[in-house]
Image (cartoon, helix red, strand yellow):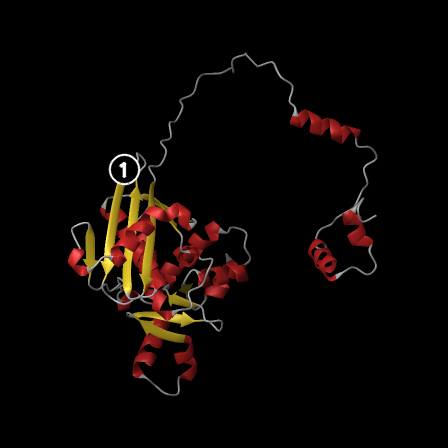
Amino acid sequence: MSKSNPLRYMMTSPIPSSRLTRWILALSEFDINVISPTTKKSQALAELLATFPVAGSNLVHEEVPGEPHEVAVVEEEQKWQLMFDGAAATGKRGIGIVLIGPESQVITKACKLMYGCSNNEAEYDALITGIELATSKGIKHLVIRGDSRLVIQQLKGEFAVKEPALTKYRAKAQQILQSFQTFQFEHVPRSQNRYANALATLASQIDDQEVNRAIIVVEAKDYEMVQMPCSLEDQWIRDIKARLSAGKISDYKLIRQFHIENGALYYKSPTGVLARCVSKQEAERRIEEVHGQICGTEGTLLARRLLRAGYYWESMQKDAQEI
């Protein structure tokens, strides 16, 4: 019976296994009726016609009645590709960027980093340098490809940021990305990112005496966010900032949940997820942006997705439920 009709076996088995139990619970929310087909001839005929369509079908030559209408010509978006990579090992650090245009234009950039950073921070450095280069060239549509799954998934909102050192990098990248009309992220294997990887490796390994005009030396880089004026911040953000700045020892819970990084207030969830506290005005944009990407998601899941994307505000859970 299990071989002839596995679905019926699962629904009628008296003592299912643990795996079958999970499937039964997953299927129990649907109204499923198992009906055995009386004959397979009609299904076999339909599959045969779908696999081997009849050749020489008659085409319709009759003109469509009515007045001819104007045809709108839609031009395809001129998308550029950004390949980035960062290398940080044995005290040598470098980044590589490759911009490829829609007409096969290529712009490359390699930088030797003279300041200490981890490999993930070097990857973010490469990404931010790349999108800054793209904005300086007036590019409006960008496809970003990299072999760092962590960076790509964090900016897509799939992975949460739990390292305080990476919060400023993601916040800066998100800020610059708002200048593009469209952008998308793609994770690619290292074999498809070899040009950016070669530039990053070359920049990291080259000696200071051998640096030429092709390699840019970056002594230091500080990702300062464009801060919102205090008058535009929500009152709850200003209150928490004031209490943290006062350094009251009694506010243990507040210190555990919030901290200030580069002038911005960050919330830390019980699971360690770090998210920037945003105003009500920005929250309305963010919730529409994230909800548009995952339309149909329940409020609780939408709130979690917003938190992973790096945004937090006081009424986030309530707003996510009401959308």
Q: Nearer the viewer, residue 61 or 125?
A: 125
Three-letter code for the amino acid on which mark 1 is drawn: Gln
Q: Nearer the viewer, residue 207 or 104?
A: 207
Count of numbered labels shown in the rendering: 1
The part of the image, by quadrant, that contains residue 279 is bottom left
Q: Is residue 259 above or below residue 94?
A: below
* Coordinates of residue 95 in the picture (x, y in percent): 29, 55
Q: Nearer the viewer, residue 210 or 77?
A: 210
Q: Residues within 10 Å of mark 1 (few under 14, many from 20)?
A: few
Relative to 49, 182 lies left or right: left
Q: Is residue 160 above or below residue 55?
A: below
The part of the image, by quadrant, that contains residue 224 is bottom left
Q: At x 44% / y 57%, what residue is drawn?
A: 157
* Coordinates of residue 78 in the picture (x, y in percent): 33, 37
Q: Which residue is mark 1?
A: 105
Q: At x 42% / y 79%, what residue is drawn?
A: 256
* Coordinates of residue 105 in the picture (x, y in percent): 27, 37
Q: At x 36% / y 60%, what residue is drawn?
A: 281
Asked which secondary structure carries label 1, the reply is loop
Relative to 323, 122 lies left or right: left
Relative to 218, 3 lies left or right: right
Q: Is residue 273 above or below residue 7?
A: below
